[in-house]
Image (cartoon, coloured by chain):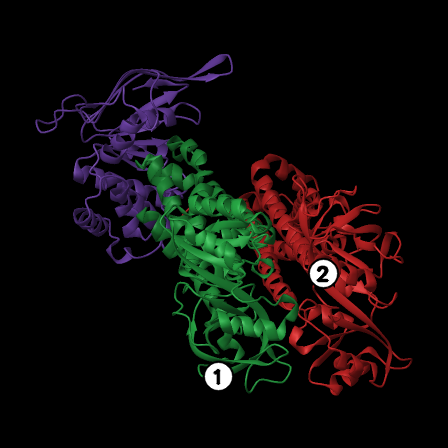
Chain colours: A purple, B red, C green
């Protein structure tokens, strides 16, 4: 199946964004399992442009979660070099990775994972409270994001009072709070029906594109890849760009 | 059963902590039960476990044997009261004594000797103010003999031991032991009245004949203890006649001890169902997903509930057993002058109370289990819900 | 931290059970502590109040006032010591007091002291026949200006004022002149009568360390008065020598200790379960850049807040219980010190209990947030 993705210059996009959002150079991830080793990711090379939206497609167990976790600074690679937004995070300690995640990447998790006892607005602000707190600017940004995501009138609602789509939008808002270089979407449509899934992908695309933020959308659903600029397939830890 | 045990095996630490908490609570409750009974017995055992049905104090004694003094005119009033059958004299004094068996010639406590405070009670009529439960030996009959409280047998008050009273070195031989007859939490000896007078004379040769502390009374045939007490009290505002049990309960401090411990027991008894209830509520919450799944694959609700109740029962049993095990060695000890005892009745009572409380508290979680709708397993539940 | 506190505010129900248990435990701690303090106060007040360095008993009295006798010659010997600046006699007799307007059989238990050197909070020795009464006797209906009749001899004394915290052997004290004490003792307890200038004990003020002073006094009396040597104790030692004081403290402190361990286990249990329940959420927060320390600090904050709330309720309940109990029924002494100590102990238990969950928080992998559906 071919993917109708618009041809985009991958390495050097526009004059304004010189640094790619993500650069993986021969990245390997190996898990020890008893005496043997399991190769989760074998020599992955991938560059995502500064405002590019890439679909990472593969069946479960293919290594896409590993790749996504390494790109997001959740996992360390066994070998290779990782650069995010021009920042080389290859040798980062756990502590450095923690602040890196706070400041430079956004996540939207599969099950949405909003904090159940916080309102929509507070679910955005929580990102600020976890790191170096900025206070008022963070609250302004949260209000602005909620406005843009069409959730202004839902700001004071708890997740349990929101619909599935609304929760997804709150999660996207949360991912954008720290003005990330890269947003990682982990199976954003897996829990949704086709129609809702397409609406969500539409929303993701417009939000990313309007901000010029790069994104990786992890999915096993070929039906949604056309919302992305291009697709990268991964099978048994091997990338196929 | 399988479900219940499998889960407990997987979560050893969690269930272990709960069992530990319950064991500590049980230990504390039982220990304090022993403490309460020990305290009361060591303070008023000598009143409760003697065989005179009625005790007559002087009002000024404020219901303590050591404070009470019966003057001859008061004694005459009591003896002359209608309904009074038999009257005996009962005197008590606290003395410094040395234990240690063989006779020594020194007048004072020699080096290395253990001088202790002991109560000596003189009675003039056998069966009227003598210990009711003789567990070893016999009641004293001859001069210089005594029956002692059994709790102190190990500290030099066993049958055959000789006690010397200081100063003066008057010797008393223990010829019997009686159960729970301490007064004022000190070793207590009952001696014939003349021996009591001899002790006083030996300790203080200048002292005259002491007055009796208390009169012991047996009502005449057909007269109740309460009736004879009322009759005696009506004779004089200086007389305070009390039936035996009342005399023990009305001793200053007894009601306070009871009341204090009641509050303490109530609080501990409230903590236990709260702890078990909280525990089961949280683990039920936590495994709601698994329970829903089990319901979906066809496990009947009552099976899940019975698994829960089995766990609760096992935990209470284990906690109780562990707590009792902790309590066992402690209950054999003495606390200062207070001998503790393994309180079997308290163990049985609390076992029942705690089982009911713990199972009752687990029922709250059972309601939650019953409320689970197996359909939820198919729809899936998002975190935000 | 803010997240944790907000959770407490949004979902108080979740913490209610733990809060109730902690409240009960806190009431237990405060009640037990108050009972201990009350018992100790009631039995040691008069000795504690002695404004002196050393209390001198006779050697064979086992630090019991009732059995101790100090002859005037012994006192003279002690007064010869250069380190001794002041010596005062002390004596006590415990009797039933008839209070006007009370029932003919309702006696108030009193301990009548004769004193020369004023204890802390007690004015100088009053005129013969007059007494300062301890405030605890108000519960028995004693009022200023009243004439109390002491003992079977009905010896009259007049209350001219009140003092506080001077109980002896659980009974309220009356503070009188040595002559009044001797008269009352003589009339009511002929067997315990003391003659002339004899006292039961001496209180001594000096300019040496109390322990050294006590040793000096005992040495000189042993040398000059072999038959009536003394045993001197510093005031704190004399307090501890009162029968039952050390046992009571030991027993109560053990019970309090085990109760705190129970509080610790309850908190450990509660927060380990909360952490298990929150594993997913913590994974997400960690992926979003939350440090383990931030999450753990949140748990500790929750434990501290729940403990503080429980303690406040418990303090209120304990104070209410104290107020509800009729005066003189239970020897309960609720003090700010005791409440604060109990709260501090509980807070320590809360933090230690929480730390059992630290390992679990550290172990949570942020990667668990990705690639899982729950």
For mark 1, give the secondary structure. loop
On screen, residue B275 versus residue C353, left or right, reads right
- Residue placed under numbered mark 2 in the picture: B205
- Residue placed under numbered mark 1 in the picture: C146
**B291 relative to A49, above or below:** below
Specify the quadrant of the image occupied by residue C338: bottom left
The span from disc 1 to disc 2 (Cα, nearest Å) is: 40 Å
Characterize the local packing of mark 2: few (<14), some (14-19) or many (20 or more) Cα atoms within 10 angstroms. few
Q: Position of residue C294 (x, y in %)?
A: 33, 39
- Kindly identify which chain the residue marked by label 1 belongs to: C
On screen, residue A96 versus residue C21, left or right, reads left
Residue plotted at (49% across, 50% down) = C233
Where, quadrant-wise, is the C terminus of chain C in this rendering?
A: top left
**Circle on res. B157:** none
Residue in front for this viewpoint, A184 or C266: C266
Residue plotted at (70% across, 65% down) = B207
Is there CB contact under 8 Å for labels 1 and 2?
Answer: no
Specify the quadrant of the image occupied by residue B204: bottom right
Characterize the local packing of mark 1: few (<14), some (14-19) or many (20 or more) Cα atoms within 10 angstroms. some
Residue plotted at (77% across, 56% down) = B189
Residue in front for this viewpoint, C289 or B213: B213
Residue in front for this viewpoint, B313 or A103: B313
- Kindly identify which chain the residue marked by label 2 belongs to: B
**B361 relative to A176, above or below:** below
Residue C274 at least partly seen = no
Q: Position of residue B252 (x, y in %)?
A: 64, 68
């Amino acid at each position: 199946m071919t993917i109708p993705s618009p041809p985009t210059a991958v390495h050097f996009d526009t004059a304004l964004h010189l640094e790619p959002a993500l650069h993986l150079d021969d990245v390997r991830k190996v898990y020890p399992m008893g005496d043997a080793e399991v190769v989760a990711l074998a020599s992955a090379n991938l560059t995502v442009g500064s405002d590019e939206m890439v679909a990472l497609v593969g069946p479960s167990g293919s290594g896409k979660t590993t790749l996504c976790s390494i790109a997001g600074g959740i996992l360390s690679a066994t070998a290779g070099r990782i650069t995010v937004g021009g920042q080389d995070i290859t040798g980062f300690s756990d502590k450095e990775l923690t602040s890196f995640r706070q400041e430079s990447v956004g996540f939207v998790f599969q099950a949405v994972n909003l904090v159940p006892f916080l309102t929509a607005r507070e679910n955005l602000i929580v990102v600020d409270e976890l790191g170096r707190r900025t206070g008022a600017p963070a609250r302004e940004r949260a209000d602005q994001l909620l406005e843009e995501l069409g959730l202004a009138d839902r700001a004071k609602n708890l997740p349990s009072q929101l619909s599935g789509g609304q929760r997804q939008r709150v999660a996207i808002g949360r991912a954008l709070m720290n003005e990330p270089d890269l947003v990682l979407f982990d199976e954003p449509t897996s829990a949704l029906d086709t129609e809702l899934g397409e609406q969500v992908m539409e929303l993701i695309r417009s939000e990313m594109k309007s901000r010029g933020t790069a994104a990786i959308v992890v999915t096993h659903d070929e039906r949604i890849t056309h919302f992305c600029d291009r697709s990268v397939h991964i099978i048994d830890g091997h990338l196929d760009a | 059963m399988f479900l219940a045990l499998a889960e407990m095996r997987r979560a050893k630490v969690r269930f272990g902590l709960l069992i530990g908490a319950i064991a500590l609570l049980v230990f504390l409750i039982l220990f304090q039960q022993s403490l309460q009974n020990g305290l009361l017995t060591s303070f008023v055992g000598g009143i409760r476990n003697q065989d005179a049905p009625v005790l007559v104090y002087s009002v000024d004694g404020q219901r303590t044997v050591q404070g009470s003094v019966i003057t001859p005119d008061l004694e005459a009033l009591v003896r002359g009261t209608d309904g009074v059958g038999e009257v005996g004299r009962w005197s008590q004094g606290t003395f410094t004594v040395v234990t240690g068996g063989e006779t020594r010639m020194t007048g004072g406590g020699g080096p290395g000797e253990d001088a202790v405070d002991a109560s000596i009670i003189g009675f003039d009529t056998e069966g009227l103010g003598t210990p009711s439960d003789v567990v070893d030996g016999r009641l004293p009959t001859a001069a210089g003999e005594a029956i002692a409280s059994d709790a102190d047998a190990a500290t030099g008050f066993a049958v055959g031991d000789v006690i010397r009273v200081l100063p003066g070195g008057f010797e008393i031989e223990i010829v019997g032991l009686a159960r729970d007859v301490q007064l004022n939490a000190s070793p207590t000896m009952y001696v014939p009245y003349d021996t009591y007078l001899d002790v006083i004379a030996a300790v203080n040769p200048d002292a005259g004949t002491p007055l009796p502390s208390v009169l012991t009374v047996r009502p005449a045939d057909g007269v109740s203890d309460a009736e004879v007490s009322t009759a005696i009290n009506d004779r004089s505002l200086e007389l305070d006649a009390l039936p035996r049990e009342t005399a023990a309960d009305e001793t200053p401090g007894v009601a306070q001890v009871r009341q204090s411990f009641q509050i303490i027991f109530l609080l501990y008894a409230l903590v236990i169902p709260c702890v078990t209830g909280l525990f089961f509520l949280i683990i039920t919450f936590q495994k709601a997903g698994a329970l829903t799944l089990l319901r979906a694959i066809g496990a009947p609700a009552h099976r899940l509930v019975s698994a829960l109740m089995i766990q609760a029962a096992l935990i209470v049993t284990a906690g109780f057993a562990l707590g009792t095990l902790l309590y066992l060695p402690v209950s054999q000890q003495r606390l200062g002058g207070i001998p503790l005892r393994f309180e079997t009745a308290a163990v049985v009572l609390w076992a029942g109370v705690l089982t009911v409380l713990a199972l009752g508290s687990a029922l709250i979680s059972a309601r939650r289990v019953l409320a689970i709708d197996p359909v939820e397993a198919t729809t899936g539940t998002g975190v935000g819900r | 931290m803010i997240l944790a506190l907000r959770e407490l505010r949004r979902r108080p129900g979740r913490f209610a059970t733990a809060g109730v248990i902690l409240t009960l435990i806190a009431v237990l701690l405060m009640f037990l502590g108050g009972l201990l303090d009350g018992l100790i106060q009631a039995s040691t007040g008069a000795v504690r109040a002695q404004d002196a360095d050393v209390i001198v008993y006779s050697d064979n009295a086992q630090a019991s006032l009732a059995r101790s006798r100090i002859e005037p010659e012994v006192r003279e010997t002690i007064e010869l010591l250069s380190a001794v600046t002041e010596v005062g006699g002390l004596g006590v007799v415990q009797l039933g007091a008839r209070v006007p307007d009370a029932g003919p059989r309702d006696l108030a238990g009193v301990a009548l002291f004769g004193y020369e050197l004023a204890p802390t909070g007690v004015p100088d020795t009053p005129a013969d026949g007059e007494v300062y009464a301890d405030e605890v006797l108000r519960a028995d209906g004693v009022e200023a200006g009243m004439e109390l009749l002491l003992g079977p001899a009905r010896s009259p004394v007049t209350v001219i004022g009140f003092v506080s915290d001077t109980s002896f052997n659980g009974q309220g004290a009356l503070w009188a002149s040595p002559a009044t004490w001797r008269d009352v003792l003589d009339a009511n307890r002929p067997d315990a009568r003391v003659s002339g200038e004899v006292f039961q004990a001496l209180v001594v003020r000096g300019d040496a360390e109390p322990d050294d002073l006590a040793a000096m006094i005992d040495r000189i009396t042993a040398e000059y008065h072999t038959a009536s040597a003394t045993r001197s104790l510093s005031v704190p030692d004399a307090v501890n020598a009162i029968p039952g004081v050390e046992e009571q403290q030991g027993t109560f402190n053990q019970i309090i200790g085990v109760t705190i361990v129970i509080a610790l286990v309850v908190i450990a249990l509660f927060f380990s379960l909360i952490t298990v329940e929150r594993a997913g959420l913590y994974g997400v927060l960690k992926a979003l850049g939350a440090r383990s320390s931030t999450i753990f600090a949140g748990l500790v904050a929750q434990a501290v807040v729940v403990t503080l709330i429980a303690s406040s309720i418990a303090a209120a309940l304990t104070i209410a219980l104290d107020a509800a109990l009729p005066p003189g029924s239970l020897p309960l002494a609720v003090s700010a010190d005791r409440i604060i100590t109990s709260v501090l102990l509980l807070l320590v238990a809360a933090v230690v209990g929480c730390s059992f969950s630290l390992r679990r928080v550290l172990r949570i992998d942020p990667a668990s947030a990705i690639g899982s559906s729950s």
